[in-house]
Image (cartoon, rainbow, N blue to C red):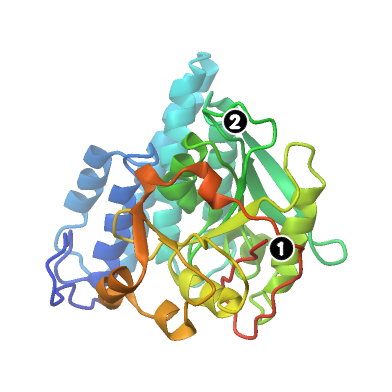
């Protein structure tokens, strides 16, 4: 089903008659700067889909075809010991596979196989690349369950225990998807980042049966407990960075907490902006949607990412699990 992509505000629509396709294409274009996509490859996919708006089978076929091509190029480069080139190919293949999976229904064995290929490609990418240094980790959760995640080491800092950001995805995001859109920028600025697939998200739901839950603080507490056991993490020096839906629900969980600053991205499509949010921030302010960002900017001090010093992203206070009653992708703040 195709829904007209035209809105009140002008935006780039690769498929003017299909909002969903245009939105996901725009997200892939955002990832070009982080190396997870290539403009010419995306445009090639779009050319092949011209006139097929709403045909999700065609969408899956073309994005998968490009993913397969990049994966094969990665395998060839790896055999020749061209490891950095191989890493780049695998990174882009992962993104294209996950773009294909967006509209692959039902979520059956075939779709799981495609998603598993995306995870395998990303694991190859972080293993082969020279930057940033990334660990593929498992965070103990409930019983024998574990949350899949990446721990990405800070760059451009002499601190043995730099600040740590817990980066959460949006409602339908993945840890791989957020890597090129936020993780790389935070790491470059002297902060380590842990990027998990939390309950109901990505690999956690697809392969581990870890479903969405109302008490998201349980997952947040598990992540923090795991972080505090690491020798390269300073206790109680973590902050949170939610994308998309995680913005609204993080605020529900933290509006009454004595935290300053609270680090948030206010729009999944706009340039990165951060809010220095005091304890006086009201919940209704945090629930503004994308169309009301201007009001948020007027009421809060907004700082471009380039000018946020790492020192402002740390805080110290006794750790207590936050209380959240409605959390889909809420963040744990310490």
Residue 206 image offset from top left, x and y in percent: 62, 64
Q: Secondary structure at mark 2?
A: loop
Q: Where's the N terminus, which quadrant?
A: bottom left
Which residue occupies 44% across, 41% down? 185
Q: Is residue 57 visible?
A: yes
Q: Quadrant of residue 140?
A: bottom right
Q: Nearer the viewer, residue 170 or 163?
A: 163
Q: Quadrant of residue 7?
A: bottom left
Q: Nearer the viewer, residue 231 or 75?
A: 231
Would you name the residue on which mark 2 appears?
A: 133
Mark nearer the N terminus (2 vs 1): 2
Q: Secondary structure at mark 1?
A: helix
Confirm or deny contact between disc 2 and disc 1 (CB under 8 A): no
Alpha-carbon neighbours of circle 1 within 10 Å: few (<14), some, or many (≥20)?
some
Residue 174 image offset from top left, x and y in percent: 52, 57
Q: Where's the C terminus, which quadrant?
A: bottom right
Q: Is residue 91 above or below residue 252?
A: above
Residue 14 image offset from top left, x and y in percent: 17, 58
Which residue occupies 77% across, 62% down? 222
Which residue occupies 46% across, 43% down? 309
Would you name the residue on which mark 1 appears?
A: 208
Q: Nearer the viewer, residue 131 or 51?
A: 131
Spatial CA distance of label 2 from label 1 is 26 Å
Alpha-carbon neighbours of circle 2 within 10 Å: few (<14), some, or many (≥20)?
some
């Amino acid at each position: 089903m195709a829904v007209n992509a035209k809105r009140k505000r002008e935006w780039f629509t690769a498929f003017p008659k299909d909002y969903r396709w245009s939105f996901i294409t725009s997200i892939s274009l955002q990832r070009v700067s982080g190396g997870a996509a290539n403009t010419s490859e995306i445009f090639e996919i779009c050319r092949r889909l011209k006139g097929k708006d709403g045909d999700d089978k065609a969408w899956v076929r073309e994005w998968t075809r490009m993913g397969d091509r990049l994966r094969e190029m990665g395998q060839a480069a790896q055999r020749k010991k061209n490891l950095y080139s191989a890493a780049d190919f695998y990174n882009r293949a992962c993104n294209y596979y996950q773009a294909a999976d967006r509209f692959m229904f039902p979520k059956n064995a075939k779709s799981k196989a495609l998603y598993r290929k995306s995870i395998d490609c990303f694991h190859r990418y972080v293993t082969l690349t020279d930057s940033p240094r990334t660990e593929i980790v498992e965070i103990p959760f409930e019983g024998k369950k574990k949350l899949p995640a990446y721990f990405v080491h800070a760059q451009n800092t002499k601190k043995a225990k730099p600040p740590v950001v817990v980066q959460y995805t949006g409602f339908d995001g993945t840890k791989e998807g957020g890597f090129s859109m936020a993780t790389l920028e935070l790491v470059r600025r002297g902060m380590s980042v842990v990027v998990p697939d939390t309950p109901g998200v990505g690999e956690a739901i697809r392969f581990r049966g870890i479903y969405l839950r109302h008490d998201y603080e349980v997952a947040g507490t598990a992540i923090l407990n795991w972080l505090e056991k690491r020798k390269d993490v300073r206790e109680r020096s973590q902050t949170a960075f939610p994308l998309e839906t995680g913005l609204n629900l993080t605020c529900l969980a933290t509006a009454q907490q004595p935290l300053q600053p609270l680090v948030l991205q206010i729009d999944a499509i706009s340039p990165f902006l951060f809010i220095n949010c005091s304890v006086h921030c009201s919940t209704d302010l945090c629930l503004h949607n994308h169309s009301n960002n201007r009001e948020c900017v007027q009421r809060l001090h907004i700082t471009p990412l380039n000018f946020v010093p790492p020192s402002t992203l740390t805080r110290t206070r006794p750790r207590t699990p936050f209380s959240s009653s409605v959390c889909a992708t809420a963040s744990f703040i310490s």
